[in-house]
Amino acid sequence: MFMYYHGMVAPLESLWDELTPKLFGYLVNVLHDKTLAEDILQNTWTKALQALPRYHDRGKPFQAWLFAIARNECNQHWRKGSREVPLDPGTHDIPDVPSAGHTDSIYIDQIMAKLSEDDRELLRLRYIADLPMNDIAKILNINIIAVRVRVHRALKRARSNNHA
């Protein structure tokens, strides 16, 4: 199966390979549960594939469309149950011996926890999912200028919370 993506025809497999790591990283950061993130990732791709025949790039690139589906899947999960996910070291793949990367991850989680959900969402989409500002604007249904301003302000708040 082929589809139009970023101005070129790309096989679905290439899209999967390109977008799945970004989407999974985003979901793990949002959900703080690797197993749940895997389930939501699978649901996201399933819904995207089911809706693919109806997908048309109407100013919302495939990547933005896919992340919007993932956000909706997370919201649906939270509506069904609790937002709180108990920490289970086995589920969360936390190593017994902290590595430098693990320590950085804890530090980032502590900074992110001090931010509002809106700020966290912007930073996840921009830096964890590595999405361009245009795609973030389309996912959040706001203009690109607002995205730039909000990301800048979120980073400023993160820096100031870091020094507090």
Image (cartoon, rainbow, N blue to C red):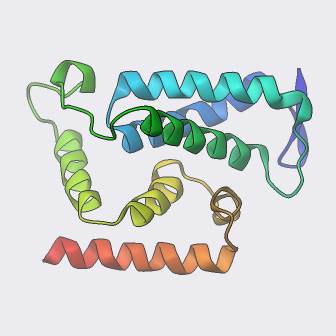
Work out which quarter of the rendered image holds the C terminus and state it.
Answer: bottom left
Is 118 placed above or below 83 here? Answer: below
Q: State the image coordinates of residue 30 (x, y, percent, origin top left).
A: 40, 44
Residue at point 59%, 72% (across, down): 147
Eyeballing the image, is 148 above or below 120?
A: below
Image coords of residue 58 (percent x, y): 89, 54
Tally the numbered discs.
Answer: 0
Residue depicted at x 49% and y 62%: 122
Residue 54 versus residue 100: which sits nearer the camera? Answer: 54
* Residue drawn 77% across the image and 43% down it: 62
On the image, the x and y values in percent for residue 156 come to 35, 79
Between 55 and 161, the one nearer to me in the picture: 55
Which quadrant: the N terminus? top right
Q: Quadrant of residue 139?
A: bottom right
Q: Quadrant of residue 135?
A: bottom right
- 29 relative to 97 in the view: left or right: right
Picture coordinates of residue 61, whole percent (x, y)? 79, 50
**Residue situated furthest front in the rendering:** 80
Residue at the image position 27 percent from the left and 34 percent from the top? 85
- Is residue 136 placed above or below 37 in the rendered structure? below
Q: Quadrant of residue 49?
A: top right
Describe residue 38's horizontal placement relative to residue 136 as left or right: left
